[in-house]
Image (cartoon, grey):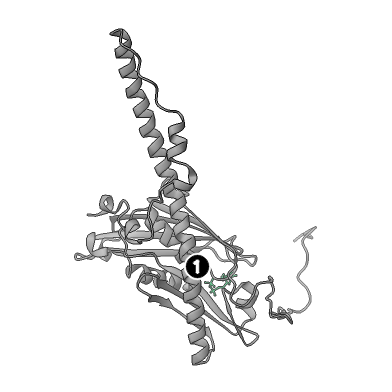
Amino acid sequence: MGKMDGVKPISGTYKPPVKPKLLDKNGLRLDGRKADELRPLKIEAHVLNRADGSAYLEWGKNKVLVGVYGPREVHPRHLAKSEKGIVQCRYNMAAFSVSDRKRPGPDRRSQEISKVASEAFEHVVFTERFPRTTVDIYIEVLEANAGTRCAGITAASVALVDAGIPMKDMVVSCASGKIENTMVLDLGKEEDNFGQADVPMAIIPSTGDIVLLQMDGELSKDELAQAIEMNIGACKRIYEIQRDALKRRYSVGKEQEEEEAEEERKKEERKDGEGKDRDGGAREPGPDQSAKGDDWGDGEKPAPFDEDVGEFKENKGGESDG
Ligand code: UDP
């Protein structure tokens, strides 16, 4: 074999990663966050054209894309249930989502996350309304930096609503844990790697039901209670961000509808005007150009769904129903 120019030889002994100091003297974390602070989170609904529903999320350095299909025929067929539908979630971490090599395809971890996420969503989707069918949720982690199951579940909820799947409510997910003997919210990668415990959780905000609770590491009973409390508080904030993503998506839809209706009205008026001209009648004044601006000033634009969560449950739900 010839010499491989430019290829660095593997030499020396393996050095394990050194644990960084996770909290500074002011109690701030590696990325400058306080103990109860979330990483920046943004969500966008309906980012894919082919899927029935979709969402894209960035949470700290995590990037997650979700596509939802259904209710549709179950494959393989033997998984179908005659009395209700099923929810199948597939979590996948892209091979390029982490800096170390990630073997492409499913592994034990992704199967576990897919299973717990499917079970979480079965608590909110009205599966009894569409027997023998499936709702398929594809969570694709494009970049991972700890907390990807929570990010995936949170984004998937928005994608489910976008697909018009009839649901009791959205599922919201967040993790907290313990680093340097301190309880903190929403662990980052180093905190996850070198911390003492991690507690991912998912809730249904309107009922307070916990639909996912896992723990990695060791915590006292009190610390676990504290982690749960922190997660619930954070989920309420995240829920607002999910709802905002949907409001943004559906306000645009509403605006387009209004514009089309306005266009239609103008056409009708033009037709009427032409008719009158031919008859020698006086032309009606044209539509007030300022009307649109007046009626649809940003501040006055009606929200697609107000405070009542029930309103988005029904969104497109009827279409998918049955
Ligand atoms: N991770 C990785 N390679 C893997 C699995 C995980 O680098 O094969 C990283 C990734 O950044 C992930 C983090 O480890 O977000 C924590 O993984 P964990 O199993 O705790 O799940 P998560 O916190 O992402 O839900």
Q: Please indicate, yes or no, whether residue 131 appears anywhere in the rendered image.
A: no
Image quadrant holding the C terminus, namely: bottom left
Tell which of 122 and 113 is nearer to you: 122
Ligand 1 quadrant assignment: bottom right
Q: Nearer the viewer, residue 59 or 32?
A: 32
As drawn, the residue found furthest toward the left would be: 83
Dot 1 corresponds to which residue?
237
| Number of other residues with Cα within 10 Å of mark 1, as a class: few under 14, some 14 to 19, many 20 or more | few
Location of residue 283 (image quadrant): top left
Residue 278 versus residue 11 in the image, above or below: above
Q: Residue at x 35, y 19 (%)?
A: 284
The answer to whether residue 276 is visible is yes
Corner quadrant of residue 207? bottom left
- Would you identify the image quadrant in which residue 26 lies? bottom right
Question: Residue 285: horizontal and vertical position, in percent?
Answer: 38, 20
- Badge 1 marks a residue whose secondary structure is helix
Above or below 281: residue 201: below
Q: Nearer the viewer, residue 303 or 140?
A: 303
How many numbered marks appear? 1
Q: Please provide percent x and percent y for residue 162.
A: 39, 53
Q: Position of residue 155 (x, y in %)?
A: 46, 61
> From the viewer's perspective, is residue 290 above or below residue 303?
above
